[in-house]
Each structure stands twice: as structure tokens, then as C-alpha cells.
């Protein structure tokens, strides 16, 4: 998924019951997803930064293996934190945002 697709998916999940039969454009859904993500970054940062599973995943050699391991670690760290949005999509958004940006001291 591209970055735009990830945030559009988040936005659609957030607003699924809000607009009834009105279909959101990709741009509208993406804006809603980005705004939500920015608003929950402190909660995500608290759950992820300093998490030993995430730190181990960062040290996995190879970008593909690292991203797969990091997604799994983020899934475990974020599960139950937010309702109505697939945790894998949130994990993907965190990877796109950048783990070093999220946890600058890590």
C-alpha cells in the first residue's frame, strides 16, 4: 500500500458510520486518516518507544525482513489501543512515518 492508501484506509475506518451512504473521496479519507494519526502519535509513541520487541525488530538485517518483523512487533504493541481501525494498518502508518522519527532517541 502507498502512504496515501494507508491513510485513506484509516480515514474510511474512522468515518465508516459517520457519512452513511456518502462515499468519501480518497483525498477526504486521507485527510481524516492523517489528522487522526497526528492526534494519536503521543499514545503510539508511549506504547512503541522503548518496547524491547520493537527494538529487536529494528536490528533485524535487511529491509524486507526488518519491516515484516517491525510490523509484527507493532501489531503486538498497539493491539487494543484503538478500536475500529485495523492494527496492521496503524503499524504500516508508523513504518511510513518512520520509527526513528517516532522514537528519536532509540
Image (tube, helix red, strand yellow):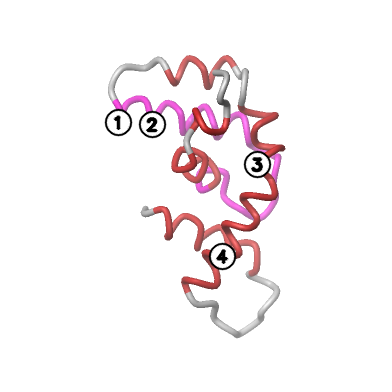
| Residue found at x 63% / y 70% | 16
Identify which residue is drawn at 42% across, 26% down: 69
Callout 2–callout 4 Cβ contact below 8 Å? no
Image spot of residue 22 (x, y percent) = 59, 84
Q: Say which of marks 2 and 3 sits in front.
A: 3
Judging by the rendered image, the residue that carries numbered circle 1 is 64
Expressed as whole percent of the image width and height from the top left, the position of residue 40 reads: 69, 45
Residue occupying the point 52% across, 40% down: 94
Return the residue nearer the eye: 86 or 31: 31
Q: Dot 4, crowdedness within 10 Å: few (<14), some or many (≥20)?
A: some
Location of residue 53 by image quarter: top right
Q: Which residue is identified by label 4?
A: 31
Give the Cα distance between marks 1 and 3.
Answer: 24 Å
Q: Secondary structure at mark 1?
A: helix
Labels 3 and 4 touching (C-beta < 8 A):
no
Dots 1, 2 in contact, CB < 8 A: yes
For marks 2 and 4 on the same chain, the one whose residue lies earlier in the sequence: 4
Helix, strand or loop at label 4? It is helix
Contact check, label 2 and label 3, Cβ < 8 Å: no
Q: Mark 4 or mark 1: which comes first in sequence?
A: 4
Task: Tell me the number on the disc at residue 41.
Answer: 3
Q: Secondary structure at mark 2?
A: helix
Mark positioned earlier in the residue sequence (2 or 3): 3
Rendered position, 53 above or below 22: above
Residue shown at the point (50%, 45%) measured from the top left: 93
Which residue of the protein is positioned furthest toward the bottom in this rendering? 21
Circles 4 and 1 in contact, beta carbons < 8 Å: no
Residue range highlighted in magenta: 63-89
Q: Are marks 1 and 3 in contact (CB under 8 Å)?
A: no
Q: In the image, which disc is placed on residue 68?
A: 2
Q: How many neighbours does mark 3 have within 10 angstroms: few (below 14), some (14-19), or many (20 or more)?
A: few
Amino acid at each position: 500500500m502507498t502512504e496515501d492508501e494507508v491513510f485513506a484506509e484509516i480515514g474510511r475506518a474512522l468515518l465508516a458510520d459517520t457519512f452513511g451512504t456518502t462515499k468519501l473521496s480518497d483525498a477526504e479519507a486521507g485527510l481524516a486518516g492523517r489528522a487522526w494519526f497526528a492526534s494519536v502519535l503521543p499514545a503510539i509513541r508511549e506504547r512503541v518507544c522503548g518496547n524491547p520487541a520493537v527494538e529487536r525488530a529494528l536490528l533485524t538485517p535487511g529491509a524486507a525482513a526488518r519491516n515484516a518483523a517491525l510490523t509484527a512487533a507493532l501489531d503486538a504493541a498497539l493491539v487494543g489501543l484503538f478500536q475500529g481501525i485495523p492494527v496492521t494498518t496503524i503499524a504500516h502508518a508508523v513504518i511510513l512515518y518512520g520509527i526513528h522519527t517516532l522514537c528519536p532517541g532509540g
